[in-house]
Amino acid sequence: MTTAPSQLDDEGPRNCVVVAMPAGKSTHELVRYLVGMDIVPIVIAGARHLRYLADLVRVDLAVLAVEVSVSDAQVERAVAELEVPVLLLGETARTTVVEPAAVLARDADDFEVAIEVRRQMSGLQRGRVSFGALELDVRRHLATWCGRDLDLTPTQFRILSVLVRASGCVVSRRELCRRAMGTYGPGDEARLEAHLRRLRTRIETAAAQPLLVTVRGEGIRLVDRVG
């Protein structure tokens, strides 16, 4: 009889990084630098085991090489589904699924990449992301505005999480559907609009001002009107 491995509790490692890069000397050097910085790297060259690993290990950030996402589109999607900041390596290329927190040239020195990873991770709070006065505890699915609790459904929380992580950038309805509801097809945009209406009501009741802005023909973005 076998037992499934238990998921690490909330006090488990908080410094794990997914490294999605081609197997080679560069990856080896980057891993060596990260380990030396007390960062735990999870190296993948394909998406096959990433979703399984993400259920077992706390992941805080991902390093994604453009050539990996080009050769295996499932890697890009699996990394996006982690809902963590992404450091994208590959000139100024921007992928269609992952919205990176930063972009570095692919020929960046491995130590430079490791330093950028350390810099980003040092700015991450314990499982929290924020935009203006909005703060989300992504581990406990709690949202607050200026310290006031927002009573959100799981779908509303996921929508808000996607928008908060975009830091004021526009997110298309297609991307909101895919990342917050897990699907995009006939009728999904109508469902999304219903969720957005309720989410607006919850936020504006607390903030007493509109924070979700519709950009015609492009999508939705958050604004910070405090002050």
Image: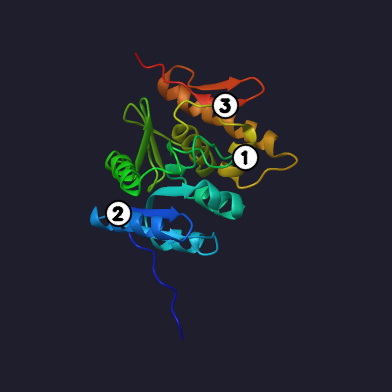
Q: Earlier in the sequence, mark 1 or mark 3?
A: 1
Q: Position of residue 210 (x, y in %)?
A: 49, 18
Tell me what residue is drawn at x 37 percent, y 25 percent. Answer: 132
Quadrant in which the C terminus appears: top left
Q: Position of residue 62 (x, y in %)?
A: 42, 49
Q: Report helix, strand or loop for mark 3.
A: strand
Q: Residue furthest bottom?
A: 1
The residue beneath circle 1 is 177
Mark 3 or mark 2, whichever is nearer to me = 2
Is the C-beta separation of discs 1 and 3 under 8 Å?
A: no
Query: What whole-number distance in Å separates the C-alpha atoms at marks 1 and 2?
Result: 35 Å
Is the C-beta separation of discs 1 and 2 under 8 Å?
A: no
Q: Earlier in the sequence, mark 1 or mark 2?
A: 2
Tell me what residue is drawn at x 27 percent, y 42 percent. Answer: 122
Is the C-beta separation of discs 3 and 2 under 8 Å?
A: no
Q: Position of residue 6 (x, y in %)?
A: 39, 69
* Residue 76 visible to the viewer: no
The residue beneath circle 2 is 34
Q: Amino acid at mark 3?
A: Ile
| Disc marking residue 220 | 3
* Residue 161 visible to the viewer: yes
Query: What whole-number distance in Å separates the C-alpha atoms at marks 1 and 3?
Result: 12 Å
Q: Report helix, strand or loop for mark 1.
A: helix
Q: Nearer the viewer, residue 223 or 198?
A: 223
* Residue 2 location, quadrant: bottom left
| Disc marking residue 67 | none
